[in-house]
Amino acid sequence: MPSKDAKSAQKKGSKLSKAEKEQLQKEEDQRRQKEEEEARLLAEKDEQERLERERKEHEEHQRLELKDKDRREDELNELRHLLEENQTAVTKWETDSRAKAKWDRYMRCDGSPDPSVQQEINTFINLWCEDPEVQIKPVLKECALALQLLDELEGMLRDQPEAADAVRYQETLLSIQTLIQSKLDHSTEEILKWANAHSDIETGNMQTVVQDDIITLCLWANLNKNPRFKGFQFEEVGLGFELPKQLAVSDVAVRILHTHYDHLSHRANLKSQNPSRMSLGLGAREEPLLEGETPVGECEDTEGDGDRRGSTQQGGAEEEVQSVRGSEGRKSAVSVISMKEERRSGQKQLEDAKQKLEENGSQIDTMLEGDDSGEGDSAPTPMDPVIDSYEGQVVDLQQYTPLGGVFYCDVFRLPPQSQQLNGWEMRELLDTGLQPFPYPTEQTQIQGSASMKLEDSGVLTCPPVGVTVTLPDSVLILEDPQVARWDPEGQHWKTDCISETSYDQAERKISFKMDSFYAFTLLQDSYANMPFQSWELRPLGQDSALLTITAALTEGSKCMLQSDQERGLNHILGQWMSPSVLQKAMVSAGVNIFVNQYSDKYVSVNAKDPLIENAVYEQMALLSSAFAFSWSQWNTQCGHEYLVLQVCEHLDPVPVREDSWCVYLLGAQRSQKLRIKEHSEAFSPELDPGSEFHSTFLHMLRDGMSPAGQERRSHHLFIEAVHRLLRVTRPLTYS
């Protein structure tokens, strides 16, 4: 063990002298000063390098801008030439197609009238009015022919004919619709006259179903008058009803007439287009932006409200990006008076229909004179849609779409049945036609939901009528459907007088009660699929591309629809159609991914300059045989005047690899490829090294295009089809 003295000497030796401490501090200061000097020099070097780099980048940026400026006019002229050349070819094809269609219609020689020839269609209507045929099978065949004529008339109206022709077509359309309903009512009466001859042995009542591909007629005649009768189900067609006791003991017949067409909703639209003839609704409006209402071969200028908004943009930017095909807002050709029509039956119905045909012309002519106001061809003043609020229950057809056609649910007085007497069959003949049975009765009928009164015992004196509908297979239901009934006086759909609605999703069956008998339809939110989750347009080969839109509830592609969802879409899947025909078929089936000038009032959108947007769609269509385009998350972070999307050259009919995509920023003045990728941490408009600025998106992509891609020259009709699909879906705004 060391001694205490040794320990003391050791401690004393371990202490530093003052001089030593000062020396150590001096060395530490010198080391720190050296490090600071080195850091300063390094920072100065870094700053010099940064300034030099920025100088070079600025010089390079200026060089690229000057290069872009020098070739701007050439690029814009080349793009203009391509679009004009394509449009000229499309216009010629349309003209030739119309001429051929007109000739083919003339040479059809199948006995059907040409609806564009007034004499032929008038002769058809008059002869059908006077035709005494009442048997349901022949009548259904006649109705099928009449519906084909209606389709032709609607097509002619979409072609924007002269005002006088449009009035005539609309007049003819309304007359044929009225006559179809009149004929069906007359056949219904004929069946009911012979109800006792076709009564069911088990129930003692008569029930029958007659149908074709478009019309389903279900009839039940109360011959037994059993007070315990509750209702009846037409199992083969998925329709049924529940009857109140008052009607179960009355001489009545119930009809459920399901038409796959809808001849009622357009009357609400016609009424809304004529503000002088309505109490609530819409004013005169221009046609929708990017509507795409016609087939590929029927070119229309469809710039609407979006282009009017875009016209306020400043200066040359607008001139450079807007379509060189310069389109004008389409004007509404006519305003047609909304007709209030009651369904009548028997000979009286036919006479009324014929009288309407004679009177329609003068009514519409009067309306035109009142609407013109000496303005000639001036466009109507656009108005924002006014959501009807009459009793708070009028359906806004801008927001909701009727699905599955119309169901006419009626109760009629049972016509006198034949009696057997001494070998003779006797029948009372009436000339009143088919007579509706009042329910609720006139003594208890009160407007609205108060139409059912309670007795002192608390029992309803006029209980509601129950209805059960199995949804047609031709309809895809995205959400629980709503039920609306037709108001013949107000000429619109309403949701009042309907209660206890329930929907069985597994069985696709909806049940509800109504306080009386009405025509009704099923409604679905038109924008249930919006905004889109993502989209992709990729080529499958020469003049072949796949547009996939991942919507909120469904996923599909066009012009031949493909979908993982088969039920409700089998009738249109895998069929080649023009864009407008496909649009109509999809909307009718409950799959709406198409927008109009009112859509942004119901959907939260990523608003973009419509002129820039449409210019991009035009150029995407030109290159859609060689390039794939896709949604980008950065499109929501680049502002109103810019668009961001992913692009890559893609020549094989296989899905695009994730690492193949590049991000592009598109604006009014130029297009550029960005350094960032889709999965980068933040958005940056920094130019991708090695790329250049271009005045058009077309030339931006051509800059790095492979020789194989340059050889792909798309057909003008394919380009037009892709452009129309992009215009009517507007994925850059609605995703």
Image (cartoon, grey):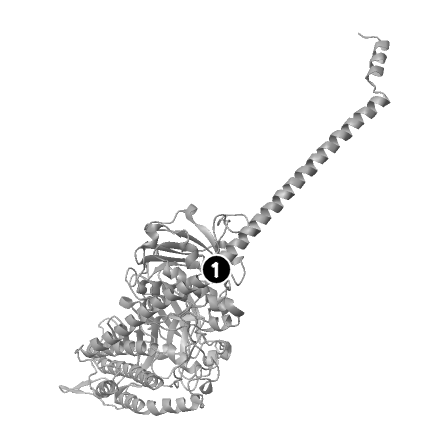
The percent coordinates of residue 229 (x first, y second) are 33, 73
Q: Residue at x 51, y 72 (%)?
A: 309
Q: Dividing the picture into quarters, in which one does residue 424 lie?
A: bottom left
Give the position of the N terminus as an image quadrant.
top right
From this view, report whether residue 376 is shown above or below residue 239: below
Residue at image mark 1: 70
The percent coordinates of residue 651 (x first, y second) are 34, 51
Q: Which amino acid, mark 1? A: Asp
> Count the marks: how many?
1
- The answer to whether residue 473 is seen in the rendering is no
From this view, report whether residue 18 is shown above or below residue 640: above
Q: In front: 266, or 260?
A: 266
- The answer to whether residue 619 is seen in the rendering is yes
The percent coordinates of residue 351 (x first, y second) are 27, 90
Q: In front: 332, or 238?
A: 332
Q: Residue at x 16, y 78 (%)?
A: 109
Q: Residue at x 30, y 58 (%)?
A: 543
From this view, report whether residue 500 is shown above or below residue 254: above
Q: Dividing the picture into quarters, in which one does residue 42 lie?
A: top right
Q: Residue at x 40, y 63 (%)?
A: 79
Check disc 1: other Cα within 10 Å, few if <14, some if 14-19, many if 20+: few
Query: Is 55 displayed left or right of 688 in the figure?
Result: right
From this view, report whether residue 516 is shown above or below residue 563: below
Circle 1: element type: helix
Q: In front: 172, or 251?
A: 172
